[in-house]
Image: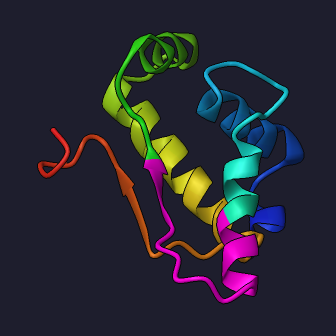
Amino acid sequence: GTVAKVLSREEIDDAFEHWNNGSKNRPKTRRLVDPMFCRLRQYNTLYICGTDEYGTATETKALEEGLTPQQICDKYFKIHKEVYEWFQIKFDFFGRTTTKQQT
């Protein structure tokens, strides 16, 4: 099913809030728009995104939800991926900071 059928608006908003370290004004949204604009203009663009899974925000959210930091990272990575797919946001690479290549 689509993200709309699987996730509530609150869960999507919560994913964005976590992604912005608790900020609801979503300043990182522009980072989604700039590469799409460049692609529309046919500029040679490499669009890389991912989840930052280290730090206080991750630990705090894990404690709030009664999960381990790894469980919270897995949960929100999946939500982020589904949200981007639902909005048809295409990355050349979508990764996460807890992989062996990043750590």
Taking the spot 14% from the left edge, 52% from the top edge, the residue there is 101
Q: Nearer the viewer, residue 5 or 20?
A: 20
Taking the spot 60% from the left edge, 52% from the top edge, the residue there is 79
Q: Does the magenta-highlighted stretch encompass residue 39? A: yes
Q: Give residue 102's position: percent from left, percent from top.
A: 20, 45
Q: Give residue 99's position: percent from left, percent from top.
A: 21, 48
Q: Is residue 44 left or right of residue 69?
A: right
Q: Is residue 37 left or right of residue 84?
A: right
Q: Give residue 85's position: percent from left, percent from top.
A: 65, 72
Q: From the image, which quarter does the C terminus lie in?
A: top left
Taking the spot 45% from the left edge, 44% from the top edge, the residue there is 51
Q: Nearer the viewer, residue 37 or 24?
A: 37
Q: Give residue 74's position: percent from left, percent from top.
A: 41, 44
Q: Does the magenta-highlighted stretch encompass residue 102? A: no
What's the magenta region?
Answer: 35-50
Name the colour scheme: rainbow
In this rendering, the answer to whether 97 lies above or below 46 is: above
Count the labels in the image: 0
Q: From the image, which quarter does the N terminus lie in?
A: bottom right
Q: Is residue 94 left or right of residue 79?
A: left
In this rendering, the answer to whether 95 lies above or below 11 is: below
In this rendering, the answer to whether 63 lies above or below 68 is: above
Taking the spot 45% from the left edge, 21% from the top edge, the residue there is 58
In this rendering, the answer to whether 52 lies above or below 54 is: below
Q: Nearer the viewer, residue 19 or 40?
A: 40
